[in-house]
Amino acid sequence: TDPAGAYGRYCKPGLVARLGALGLDVTYERAEGDYLWYQSGGRLQRVLDFVGGYGTTLFGHYHPDLVAGARRQLDARVPVFAQASCRSGAAELAEALCDRLGDFVVTFVNSGTEAVEAALKHAHLERPRPVVWAVKGGFHGKTLGAVQLTWSQRGMFSGMGPRVRYLDPDDPADWEAARAEVADVSAAVVEVVAGEGGVRPRPAAFLRWLADTCRDAGVPLVVDEIQTGMGRTGTFLASEAFGLEPDYLCLGKALGGGMAKIGAMLVRRERYVEAFSVLHSSTFAEDDPTCRIGLEALRVLDRDDLPGRCAARGEFLRRELRDVQARYPNQIADVRGLGLMTGLELRAQSDSPSQIIRAASEQGLLGYFGAAYLLHVHSLRVMPTLSQPLTLRVQPSAYVSEADLARFVRGVEGLCKVLRAADAGRLVDF
Ligand code: PMP
């Protein structure tokens, strides 16, 4: 069998051609903790996985307590599809979220992008206005509504959803210009740390301005914590570290413990429009097993202090990476992040003596070449962020060991050496 061939033929023709050209067309067979395994030369090759399911596997792959919980539910024949009834799993998970976040009404959904869709719809009911504010470089999903807010992807679909005014988070003059139209704004949607936009914490002054402006004008502030939430950045919400109080909150990814697909859109009770509870629903949303996996994830998060672990391990990782950056300033442009959400920005190699490396850099492929090198030479899995291809996302689980982080740092140093030596042979020919 040839899974890459079939996947390319029947599922993702364009993507597989690209993965193949880069040497990234690997099929993983097994996953546990921070590791993935694939077949290579007749045996299973173990890879340290720092893509982390694009931020989903905060608990690692197959956390034993979450597996045991899921198993208990299968054995107990817990109902999955009992729509239009009063669902206990959803109720308990929503209550657990409100216990820690305040008084919200919680809409459970199936994905991050659906959480954003739900927020846009609710905002339209609450405050029907033509414009939505989003932030340059932001990423909020790829369905037709959410993609309008996704800076790098919206182009060919613009006009098929809400009209979006993008704010430049680094330009106070732009904020002031935008303020003039705030009466036309239905909602403002923001990430505290732009994940796919290159792991960039948003400037505190911008977030403060946005929160104040929204509060004064009555515009709901929608904070997208789909990637940053659940302790990833060192606090349960990244908002806490910036003193932000969301009116609406989007959660996803790690909420399902890396085992289940679940998102949530929370609206402060005083803003909630009751009609919304029938205006937004989905066949697959709110099922008991999924919600109970989310509940177990919250329990494990508290018991094992995942936010604390993320803060400590993240600091260790960035300190070590900055050490490498100091020795290779022409290969690493920046190391940034919060908690266990780290961006490692490579420097463009437009002056490399190697024509191949120069070309890769000019084509925006250097990050992908780097990822392929790290995979095949060091058994490390990273990927560029979706909108900033020079920035490698480094998102291990909260349980990652310092030894594994150190192993990753050694791999990065290997990549820097190859780039400095302009040794294209070693970069692309594994
Ligand atoms: N918002 C943010 C901040 C995200 O990082 C993502 C996914 N990378 C999404 C929304 C979309 O989530 P999903 O892929 O589950 O639709």
Image (spheres, helix red, strand yellow):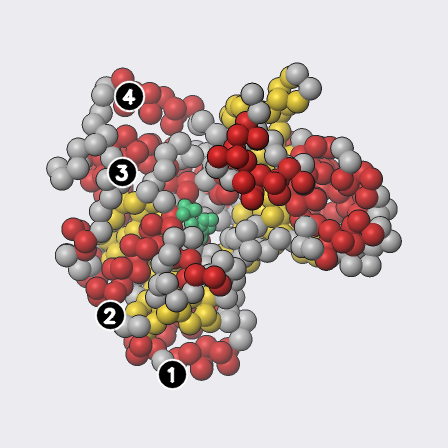
Is disc 3 placed on a helix, strand or loop?
Answer: loop
Name the amino acid type tagged 4.
Leu
Q: Residue at x 54, y 40 (%)?
A: 13
Sequence order check: which comes first, mark 2 or mark 4? 4
Is disc 2 placed on a helix, strand or loop?
Answer: loop
Q: Nearer the viewer, mark 1 or mark 2?
A: 2
Q: Residue at x 55, y 51 (%)?
A: 386
Image quadrant assignment for residue 329: bottom right
CA gap between label 3 and label 1 equals 41 Å
Name the amino acid type tagged 2.
Pro
Name the amino acid type tagged 1.
Ala
Sequence order check: which comes first, mark 3 or mark 4? 4
CA gap between label 2 and label 3 equals 28 Å
* Mark carried by residue 180: 1
Is disc 4 placed on a helix, strand or loop?
Answer: helix
Any part of residue 40 in sight? yes
Mark 1 and ligand 1: say if the CB distance to the nearest ligand atom is below 8 Å. no
CA gap between label 2 and label 4 equals 43 Å
Which residue is denoted by mark 4 in the rendering?
Answer: 74
- Check the picture and name the quadrant holding the C terminus: top right
Sequence order check: which comes first, mark 2 or mark 3? 2
Which residue is denoted by mark 2 in the rendering?
Answer: 128
- Give the crowd class for mark 3: few <14, some 14-19, many >=20 residues within 10 Å: some
Which residue is denoted by mark 3 in the rendering?
Answer: 284
Q: Nearer the viewer, mark 2 or mark 4?
A: 2
